[in-house]
Amino acid sequence: MASPPRRLAFRVEYDGTDFFGWQVQPGGRPTVQETLTRTIERVVGHPVRVDGASRTDAGVHARDQRAAVTLHHPIRPEGLVKAVNRRLPLSVAIGGAHEVPLTYHPRFANGGKTYCYRLRTAVERAPLIDRFAWRLHWTVDLERIAAAVPHLLGTRDFASFAASDGSHSGTVRTLWQWSAHREAHGVIALRVSGTAFMKHMVRNMVGTLVDVARGHWSPEDMGAAVAACDRRAAGPTAPACGLELERVFPLSATGERVWPPPDDA
């Protein structure tokens, strides 16, 4: 006899290099959602649907994707984590499983997201780094980027940075914070936090910022690109390999977005 339905939420971390994105796709192409679904079904012995907070694109990584699944099985949350991780490929892992209401859906229960895009300025290859960064053969001027990002903050129409084949119903978004700093091995990390993001939005903004950093655009040109509300007015799309969904923030107890988020979120 099946157990009463229970809803479990959990975090997912993955190297997206070999996946065609998060969402299940026709034709049997490997995706993170499909991999998790099949693995959890093997553990609990019944069909499941794994819901995610964000539909990351092909080749994009995640450190803090949020997901949830409804089970008709008495397995404890920590037992599910152990059993699923033993069966998942090395490129995917889950953690932090806990029970939530049956109505919980991670897509509608998040208070915003932070994406990190990594650039590496180097001529020589570095396989352990380049899998997660866009390798550039030219200098990146962080002062020019810092002068351009104020045009990408606040509540604006970001149509110029939306994918032409995206499924968005509107193009107005709110971005709270941009930062840029240098890490080890010549890596530059660009971070952006906001309420929600459209398909290719971060990659299109990064591609435009790199053109600013190279001197192809002035920082003021970024404002003109935003105002145009036309994808042709912005720069190129940065490669997927450098993008990571770094954090998904929970909503407050009253269902409101909180910024900055609490440290224990």
Image: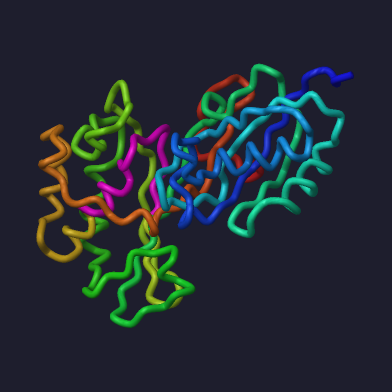
Residue 27 x/y as whole percent: 44, 38
Residue 167 point in image, percent of width and height:
32, 27
Q: Which residues are magenta?
A: 191-208
Where is 180 relative to 135, above or below?
above
- Count every numbered label the image shows and give the total: 0
In x, y percent, where is residue 39? 68, 42
Q: Nearer the viewer, residue 193 or 35?
A: 35
Residue 74 quadrant? top right
Q: Is residue 178 left or right of residue 110?
A: left
Residue at image coords 59%, 27%: 252
Q: Is residue 185 magenta?
A: no
Residue drawn at point x = 85 percent, y = 34 percent: 75
- Placement of 208 over or under 260, stated as above or below: below
Q: Is residue 53 above or below residue 105?
A: below
The answer to which of 84 and 218 lies nearer the viewer is 84
User: Is 204 covered by the magenta stretch?
Assistant: yes
**Is the C terminus in the top left, top right, bottom left or bottom right quadrant?**
top right
